Amino acid sequence: MQKNAKIFVAGHRGLVGSALVRTLEKEGYTDLVLRTHRELDLLDQHAVADFFEKEKPEYVFLAAAKVGGIMANNTVPADFIYQNLVIETNIIESARKNNVTKLLFLGSSCIYPKFAEQPMKEEYLLTGTIEPTNEPYALSKIAGIKLCQSYNRQYGTNFIAVMPTNLYGQNDNFDLTSSHVLPALIRKFHEAKTTGAKEVVAWGTGSPKREFLHVDDLARACLFVMDNYNPTKEENEKGPIFMNVGTGEDITIKELTEMIKEIVGFEGAINWDTTKPDGAPRKLLDMTRLHSLGWKHSVELKDGIKKTYEWFLQNPPRA
Ligand code: GFB
């Protein structure tokens, strides 16, 4: 990407989109096209088509999505599948019609089968059944990958994707009913410490393993992939046209809980609410593909959590 290329970051106020904007600006990109939800409703096909016709972006980062933790996925599954499918189809079709040079679609590691061999390679896509708590969301993300691949096959576009592992960082969602585990635990331990509560309740058994990537690392990976990866003809025919993005290391939810408890400085007990779902037992990404191109993460988990806690203290959630 040229530093003066016209770049549309869809979803620029979210966890991923805001990290992309920070990174692009830091790297000297000068022509970012950004629209708030109020300015452009990505669920509105005509509005999206008009926007692309008028703005003609050269590059698109498709980071707009309906996202959430295990509980949100499980309680409003229709919103997850509907909104993600519509956002993707609207943007990808408009990108094709308006000759976008390159588009990067953001997926998720939950696209892989629940009991996939670990670590999970890109080619394990569609080789087994998906974890039920996030099947609708995962299917929408698989559809996004297949849209990109199909457009490349039929129209000769250059649409690619990344599958990030569980993300965290500044601008995360700290709402306890819809957030992911890491921001939820930061908030729970912080509030317990400040109110002098004796215990914090975590969900599930604590035995599932998860891999966590700081969102600034993901943003750097997205720029790297945009600049360094073009699918081959064979990849456009058979897949994969995407790259896993993670650290290649995971920890149990129990270990994560202890780590956050220590960083926040809570001294009480941790109790486990086993009526809440565990979700997938493990989802560690195989990083061979992206590592072989020369990219590696740089933020280690403990440092990333400390940074995120500092950000949380400066930006306390409203309710
Ligand atoms: O981060 P999380 O909500 O999503 O939960 P997933 C990860 C694990 O942490 C589960 C446990 O085993 C939860 O039961 N956990 C413990 C908690 N305490 C808490 C808590 O206070 N809040 C939350 N939220 N979890 C999501 C998918 O799966 O991850 C999405 O539903 C997406 O589709 C996203 O892929 C990255 O890792 O289980």
Image: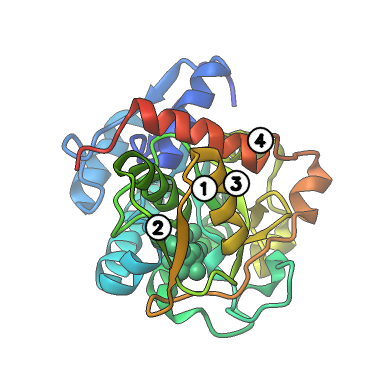
Please name the residue that numbered disc 4 is placed on: 299
**249 vs 140: above or below:** above
**Tag 1: amino acid:** Lys
Q: Nearer the viewer, residue 198 or 288?
A: 198
Q: Which residue is mark 3?
A: 213
Camera-near label (3 vs 1) is 1
Q: Mark 4 or mark 3: name the one nearer the start of the chain.
A: 3
Q: Give yes or no for contact between labels 3 and 2 (Cβ–Cβ under 8 Å).
A: no
Q: What's the residue type where badge 4 is placed?
A: Val
Mark 1 crowdedness (10 Å alpha carbons): few <14, some 14-19, many ≥20: many
User: For the residue carrying disc 3, how many other residues have a C-alpha within 10 Å: few (<14), some (14-19), or many (20+)?
Assistant: many
Say which of 182 and 248 sits in front. Answer: 182
Say the numbered circle drawn on residue 200: 2
Label 1 close to label 2 by CB (< 8 Å): yes
1 vs 4, front mark: 1
Instruction: Say what amino acid the circle numbered 2 marks.
Output: Val
Q: Amino acid at mark 3?
A: Leu
Query: What is the secondary structure assignment of the residue under circle 4?
Result: loop
Q: CA distance from mark 4 to mark 2?
A: 27 Å
- Residue placed under numbered mark 1 in the picture: 261
Residue at disc 3, secondary structure: strand
Q: Position of residue 319 (x, y in %)?
A: 19, 43
Give whichever of discs 1 and 4 has the lower sequence position: 1
How far separated are the C-alphas under marks 1 and 4? 20 Å
Circle 2: element type: strand
Whether ligand 1 has any atom under 8 Å from the Cβ at mark 4 is answered as: no
